[in-house]
Amino acid sequence: MAPEPALPTTHRALVLNSTTTPPTVQTVATPLPGPGSAIVRILVANVISYSRDIYNGKRHYAFPTPLVIGSSAIGRIAALGPDATALTLDQLVLVDPTLRGRDDPAATCLSGVHEGFTAGSRTLLRGEWRDSTYAQYAKVPLENCVALDAQRLLGSAPDGGLGYALADLAFLPALLVPYGGLRSIALQPGETVIVAPATGAFGGAAVHVATAMGARVIAMGRNRDALASIAARVDRVEAVPITGDVLADTEALQAFGAVDAYFDISPPEAAGSTHLKSGILALRPGGRVSLMGGIQGDVAIPHAAVMHRNLTLKGCWMYTREDVGALIKLVERGVLKLGEGAGVKVVGQFGLEEWKEAFDTAAENSGMGLLTLIAP
């Protein structure tokens, strides 16, 4: 067996020392693989639209410092721990940022973003998996290195490929989040699901995913032009603007017939919005609700409707490991599209030193399919 290529002793990474000071590019020691881990050479890493507010402290996310910050990424395996059984060197992988305890899957945190809410999740981010992907190399749990079929995804059509560019694959993490929520309420082909708000990065991705799962979508939002664009581009999508009138919006949703499910991905700013109540009231008896948004405070629930109609409300943070594999299958089979045909556009790709421009670009381009990337 040929020896593994030697890793460089050092590499460059974007390090945050405090939310009161900006991150800086530093030369740090390159991690070595141990049991249960791989070293991934990062090709492109996603920039969340609100990254600026995470790392300047505005969002009050909990994470240790100093920290190599980051998010989901696409990369190639540079080195493997001794117990790797399926991954191979140079394998193209999606770096899944959702870290889970191996002895307690409920201990969940987000690499480079949030240490979670339990003592176990804090152990993950403060210890072995502290550093994330805004770096040339990252140490990643083996189970978070999701193998991708490079020939199928990146190859040309005559060779049996889908012809995607590498950057197109960076849309996978945005699709995974709503896929987790939609699978958690067992969305079925032929059902009708409300997605609200539907014009942001994750809401727009939810529309795309739900239709690929065979459902009809009623997309809600305040931006009428964006709603019209989504409805024109994606099959089986109806548009209902959010007007602030609960009764009128409920009737507009019900005008399309029985509604089976409601997927909510509201941002923190939507805590006082009326659409949550309208979405619940529009459901048929036995309908289901998936709550995935970022609302921090309490919201009013139409208790009588939930009780009398036997509605199910289910929270979902991120997705399961099984969801990851199932979504990759949809993409590799060509059922769930990426690239320009799916309305995906890379609005900016930046180096580590250009992190400020990357954060600003992401904040200014938070709509469906708009990707901002860091290429270390």
Image: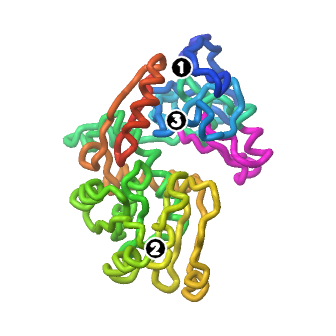
The amino acid marked with disc number 1 is: Ala
| Residue placed furthest toward the front | 245
Indicate the position of residue 31 as horizontal and vertical percent values.
65, 21
> What residue did someone put label 3 on?
51
Image quadrant in which you'd find residue 81? top right
Residue underneath mark 1: 2
Q: Is residue 5 magenta?
A: no
Residue 319 percent location from the top left of the image? 56, 54
State the separation of the CA atoms marked 3 and 2: 30 Å
Q: How is colour applied across the structure in the image?
A: rainbow
Dot 2 crowding, Cα within 10 Å, few <14, some 14–19, many 20+: many
Q: Nearer the viewer, residue 258 or 88?
A: 258
Q: Amino acid at mark 3?
A: Ser
Q: Residue furthest bottom?
A: 308
The tag earlier along the polypeptide, 3 or 2, is: 3
Above or below: residue 266 compared with residue 126: below
The span from disc 1 to disc 2 (Cα, nearest Å) is 62 Å
Residue appearing at x 24%, y 48% in the figure: 341
Residue type pointed to by label 2: Ser
* SS for dot 1: loop
> Which stretch appears magenta?
95-124
